[in-house]
Amino acid sequence: MARKKFEIPEMYQSPIIRKVKEATKIIDPMKKDLDPTLLDFGPVQFYIPRFFGFCYGVENAIDIAYRTVAENQDKNIYLLSEMIHNPTVNEDLQKKGVKFLFDTDGTERIPISSLSSENIVIVPAFGTTLDIQEQLKEVGIDPYQYNTTCPFVEKVWKRGKQLGKKDYSLVVHGKHQHEETRATFSHSADHSEVVVVLNPEEAHILADILTEDRPLSDFEKYFGHKATPDFNPLEDMIRFGVINQTTMLATETQEVMDILREAAIKRYGEADILDHFADTSDTLCYATNENQSATLALAETDADLALVVGGYNSSNTIHLVEILEHKFPTYHVRDKAELSEDMIQHFDQWDKEMKQTKDWLSGEREPLKIALTSGASCPDILVDEVLLEVLEYFEGTKNLDEVIAPFEDKIEAEEA
């Protein structure tokens, strides 16, 4: 997909991280080098990954949403739900008068029936369901006029529709209550039988039901609440393909595909497997792949700890934390407000609660090395602010301009 230029509000633009990103693009235009960039401030150093932060779909959504607000200040503007999973962005839109029709879990805040054709409704980057599209049409609102659905989410829908026309059922790797998966399920169920699996563990359960190593009754137990009515894997998975929620771990989606493909081979034989299992690896989001690959490279550094900046309900951010926490202490923070020199407040995705860790910067090593990254819905300026906040805790750090100068030189040389 050709990269277009988006208008991103000045408040989200970053004077530090932007320069690092622009310089690494110049050094590595073919995107072959995943080695992180080291920012050496003396007593503290930061490893910055090759890819992170706003992706194409998020920039597209922000561009459309802010332009819509600027051009329609005399109208009531609504978002179906959070445009992206970043509180800073959503709170700013609310300050500008934008109202949310639904919570992220689908709970209604404002009835669509109370709207009129004079109102504007912005569809978030996750997309929306066919039912909500129809409700908007009924009150005279075109759901596609201000549509910020990520093009890569739409790519998944189109691939699913292609398979549906060939009588394939669909397995969606995703979190069934997530806005994107709810939307993907809705669009897929319009033409196919559909079931959602969360992870490889559930894929193994579904695989065992397909091969009849588990009783068919287990399907209702594990999947009945997230499948189309009367889904029967023994009948509906004679031909099937796997698509995903684009923010899931790409390696995990591939694992889900492999597990179910092996089950199909066991049931139908390898010779005819292409008649039973569709290859859908081309639907994996490039940005998710890039960010996760860069995070895996970040995990291979000798960092002492990691900071991951992003919304606490951001699926892609949570997966970055999951990658890093296997290698060193990892703290998921919303922004710099969660940090102090003696204690850090951070989100624990496993216990689903905020926690506090004292003396989080303590250690005998000098320099202290910190892996610093963010989710695809997080503005780079928030990463800048976290970096600058941490620098305040150390004495004798190098001047920021001195550290950033080599990156500025590369940018200026390219522009000359």
Image (spheres, rainbow, N blue to C red):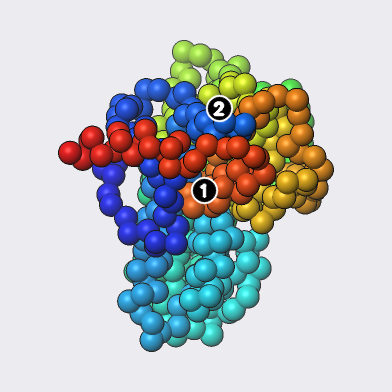
Q: Quadrant of residue 248?
A: top right
Frontmost residue, 334 versus 416: 416
Q: Quadrant of residue 110?
A: bottom right
The spot of residue 210 in percent (x, y) is 65, 28
Kindly identify the residue that appears in the image at 46 percent across and 18 percent down.
Answer: 272
Numbered circle sitting on residue 298: 2
Q: Please indicate whether residue 220 sits to the left or right of residue 401 in the image.
A: right
Name the element at disc 1.
Answer: helix
Q: Please indicate whether residue 406 sits to the left or right of residue 271 in the image.
A: left
Which mark lies nearer to you, 1 or 2?
Answer: 1
Which residue lies most toward the front here? Answer: 396
Kindly identify the residue that appears in the image at 30 percent across and 35 percent down.
Answer: 409
**Tag 1 residue:** 384
Frontmost residue, 72 versus 24: 24
Kindly identify the residue that appears in the image at 50 percent across and 29 percent down.
Answer: 38
The spot of residue 152 in percent (x, y) is 40, 45
The spot of residue 325 in percent (x, y) is 69, 31
Q: Is residue 98 visible?
A: yes
